[in-house]
Amino acid sequence: MSETQKIIEIEILRYKPESDEAPHSELYKVPFTDDMSVLQGAQYIKDNFDGSLTFRWSCRMAICGSCGMMINGIPKLSCETFIRDYYPNRISIEAMANFPIEKDLVVDLSGFIEKLESIQPYIIPKEPRTLEQGEYLQSPEEFNKYIKFTSCINCTLCYAACPQVGLNPDFIGPAAMALLHRYNMDSRDGGSAQRMELVASEEGVYNCSAVGYCSEVCPKHVDPGNAVNINKMNAAKDYFLRFLSPKGGSK
Amino acid sequence: MAGWWKKNPFYVEYMVHEATALFVTAYAFTLLFGLFRLAQGEVAWNGWLEALKSPLSIVAHLVFLVAIFYHAFTWFKLFPLTMPPIMVGGKRLAPNVVVAGGCTAGVVAALALLGLVWRIAA
């Protein structure tokens, strides 16, 4: 360590379920280089100061979606957020908002996983095809309609960004709706009527008040807020036009 | 969740946008009240017109104008979020083009309405 070594203060919200009643902050002084991410800062703390610090990470290159945290109050992937951008100010790290904390920076994602399952995230074929009939064909135009919504990495930053998820944890939420929209928009899929009951339900799209912060924080530019809002229109159409051509499950 | 909207400038802008809708309502009620006074006869109607000229009313209308202008602008800013993608020549129209298009349409509609009212009044 040279004499010009820069030191940043990192404040982390800690929570040990076995001994703590409530989360509390702890401050660490971390030497850093200009190429160090906030995730590497957390790793330095774990390796040098406190081995019990717990957080999720894997790929270190914004692909796996594991290392989401609230960094100075903003939901971010810690692997693509750099310490140098905060220096000389203090960095404060907390577990992602709107999720129950399991330990330190690890949140309980089981509710999110249930939501993902509930949207039937697979192609429900429009018409059954035999092997002899060959593969399902899709034009580039048809492909372009849903490709954007396939880029989600399930990092759940959009849930941490959504005040409506905070107010109503049952809200199906941005990422799950984006995935639902991805399948509805797929020309091979015929499941949108089956998914409509969920879209229009108490847990569905009308929880959204168009804050739009979900799309702002999305590291993959999926624009989940757009998926939610387009489905408000779809649900309204399904509700009002069901007498003319019954399709979905709006009640 | 109490006070959640104060934690982030993005949420503050959202709340200001939502709050300025109250000024849209206030102006609508001002006009509606004028209609109500018109139904009550000439004296009532002239009284309402006179009340509009008071300094308090002019200040209130200036506040309405600013608030409604802000509300309209931030409403158009939500277009790329709330509308289905607009495809032109097989490509998705860029978000800022959509916002600019909405704002332009709003300004043109407002000017057309102003011109129409001007002609009727003249």
Image (cartoon, coloured by chain):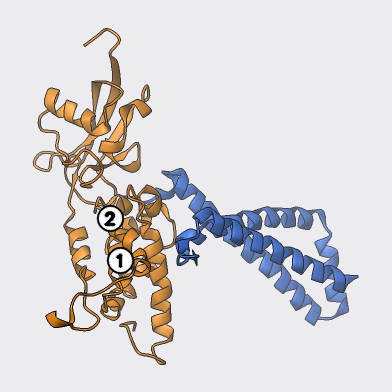
Chain colours: A orange, B blue
Amino acid at pointer 2: Cys
Q: Residue furthest top?
A: A3
Q: Secondary structure at mark 1?
A: helix
Pointer 2: residues within 10 angstroms few (<14), some, or many (20+)?
many
Q: Nearer the viewer, residue A168 or A90?
A: A90
Q: Position of residue B82 (x, y in %)?
A: 46, 64
Residue for point 31% across, 31% down: A82
Q: Position of residue A153 (x, y in %)?
A: 24, 52
Q: Residue furthest bottom?
A: A244
Residue B89 lies, with reference to residue A51, above or below; the image says below
Q: Which mark is residue B17?
A: none
Image quarter for residue B48? bottom right
Residue for point 31% across, 77% down: A196
Residue for point 74% across, 57% down: B61
**Chain bearing mark 1:** A
Write down the residue under mark 2. A152
Confirm whether residue A86 shows in the render.
no
Q: Nearer the viewer, residue A134 or A46?
A: A134
Mark sitting earlier along the chain (1/2): 2
Write down the residue under mark 1. A182
